[in-house]
Amino acid sequence: MSRETGRLEDRVVLVTGASRGIGLAIAQACAREGARVVLTARHLDELESARTTFPDESRVLIRTSHVGSRESAIDLAAWVVASFGSLDVLVNNAATNPYFGPLVDIDDARMIKTYEVNQAAIVTHVSAAWYAWMREHGGVVLNVASIGGLSVEPGIGWYNVTKAAVIQLTKQFAWELAPKVRVNAIAPGLVRTAFARGLWEEHEPVVAANIPLGRIGEPEDIASFAVTLVSDDASWVTGQTFVVDGGTTTKPSGAVS
């Protein structure tokens, strides 16, 4: 689609955790719809590599940022506005999962780290975007949750708790920031990313066989739907979480894997 007909023509989109995977795919999809995009992540080399995947690098800015820091969030939002003139769309995609095991055994350091990145960062980045631009001009927020926030799974319980919090934060912010700002979330199922590699890489055929649509997701599956939610096509939609999982959550209760 040309920029002349793009749904996000000249809007500025900030994506956290955007150097790869779902975050990068969302940024690329927004750029194809005419947006100017800002990619932020921890590592400069990965951001530089990600920027080369865009046909017009002049419409792409990169910046390293510590997503778990409120100060970094405030600085980032102000920098985006100063650099591109607005901050119309915020995509909270960054996430971490440093612990696998039962909740009763999680240590404080990894518990706090997961909370800071997956949950608290939603609050600090929405707040920063609100005060830097959206309070006066409006905007859109999209949070990336997970179907894990809707279920119980062994090993990744604390990660899922933080993603459940993302779903509730989406509702709360949608109510508090209306009508200026729309706030929605996507809850992806299993997607082919480096972040989720341990869940699919060594047994993909078995995993795919248990997904009604017969395959694990691709980052582009999430990105294409994300563009719709942050565009005017969803102008009367806020406070909602949309499951994009190939039908995984339709599995009947008691069904055998």
Image: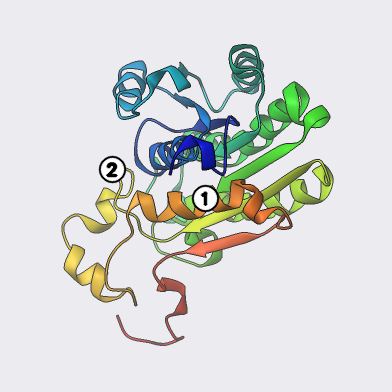
**Along the horizontal axis of the image, is 146 left or right of 142?**
left
Q: Which mark is residue 226?
A: 1
**Along the horizontal axis of the image, is 171 left or right of 197?**
right
Q: Decide if residue 156 is in sight here.
A: yes
169 vs 133: above or below: below
- Residue 47 placed where, x, y %? 36, 22
Residue at point 38%, 57% (across, down): 155
Secondary structure beneath label 1: helix
Q: Mark 2 or mark 1, which has the lower sequence index? A: 2
Residue at point 27%, 67% (across, down): 215
Q: How many marks?
A: 2
Secondary structure beneath label 2: loop
- Residue 169 placed where, x, y %? 69, 49
- Residue 44 placed where, x, y %? 36, 16
Which callout, 2 or 1, points to the residue nearer the camera?
Answer: 1
- Residue 35 placed where, x, y %? 53, 32
Instruction: Mark 2: give few (<14), some (14-19) or many (20+) Cα within 10 Å.
Output: few
175 vs 93: above or below: below
Give the color scheme: rainbow, by chain, secondary structure or one colour. Answer: rainbow
Observer-nearest residue: 7 or 223?
A: 7
Observer-nearest residue: 157 or 188?
A: 188
Q: Name the residue tied to disc 2.
A: 194
Quadrant location, the N terminus: top left
Question: In the orientation shown, which residue stands out farthest toward the front?
Answer: 4
Q: Amino acid at mark 2?
A: Ala
Instruction: Mark 1: give few (<14), some (14-19) or many (20+) Cα within 10 Å.
Output: many
Observer-nearest residue: 198 or 227?
A: 227
